[in-house]
Image: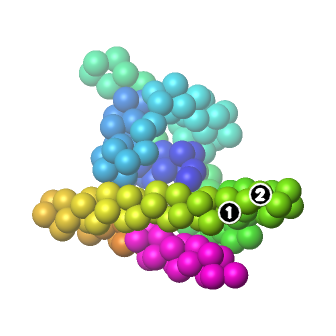
Amino acid sequence: MSVKHSLLALIYEKPRHGYELKTGFEDLVESMWPLNAGQVYTTLDRLERDELVASPGHDKKDRKLYTITDQGKEELWSWLKQPVSRSLLKDEFYFKYLCASHIDYEDKAHMIQMQKQTMVKDVLHLTHLKKEMNQSGNQTMKMLVEGALLHLEADIKWLDMIAGK
């Protein structure tokens, strides 16, 4: 997740001050990913240093406003066009399983069962969250939740496959 680019997107929409960017970010992600205020201001300092944003001054409450520059727009568009790489072969549970296999750990079946139980709890939590999103009408975040549910379904099938060996 790129805080830098999310702030550029929010500033692209309209000039904003730091706290407004923090709350705008949290609104964007339905408060699922908390953002530290210090991170916002550190990122804004870097964006200004790199000439991706500029400050036309302060608002009526003396809060520093930021606007996106042409260079900032180019950076945002470039980021949006780039595909996202995924770490398909780095899985923390499988790494633990490899280590357990390496030392002939006797209770690998229990490891798998406990991991599966954790994933089932995640499915239940996300299913509840999806219902809330249906009620609130937030289709954008609902897509994220649905994607996470699909990943969990595949991961549970994968654990079943490992357990069957």
Residue 14 visible in the picture: no
Query: What residue sits 60% from the left and 39% below the top?
Result: 47
Residue furthest to the right? 102
Position of residue 122 in the picture relative to residue 104 (left or right): left
Query: What is the span of residues highlighted in magenta in the rendered image?
Result: 148-165
Q: Horizontal and vertical percent for residue 143? A: 35, 71
- Check the image and report above or below for 127 versus 118: below
In magenta segment, residue 149: yes
Q: Horizontal and vertical percent for residue 164? A: 63, 82
Q: Amino acid at mark 2?
A: Tyr
Position of residue 17 in the picture relative to residue 127 (left or right): right
Labels 1 & 2 near each other (Cβ < 8 A)? yes
- Check the image and report above or below for 30 versus 164: above
Position of residue 53 in the picture relative to residue 46 (left or right): left
Query: What residue sits 46% from the left and 57% below the top?
Result: 118
Q: Is disc 1 placed on a helix, strand or loop?
A: helix
Query: What residue sits 31% from the left and 50% below the top?
Result: 30
Residue 129 visible in the picture: yes
- Alpha carbons under labels 1 and 2: distance apart: 6 Å
Q: Amino acid at mark 1?
A: Lys
Q: Mainly helix, strand or loop, the magenta region?
A: helix
Task: Say which residue label 2 marks.
Answer: 105
In magenta segment, residue 27: no
| Front in this rendered view, residue 28 or 48 | 28
Mark 1 crowd level (few <14, some 14–19, many ≥20, 10 Å Cα): some
Query: What residue sits 28% from the left and 18% below the top?
Result: 61
Q: Which dot marks residue 108? A: 1
Q: Is disc 2 placed on a helix, strand or loop?
A: loop
Mark 2 crowd level (few <14, some 14–19, many ≥20, 10 Å Cα): few
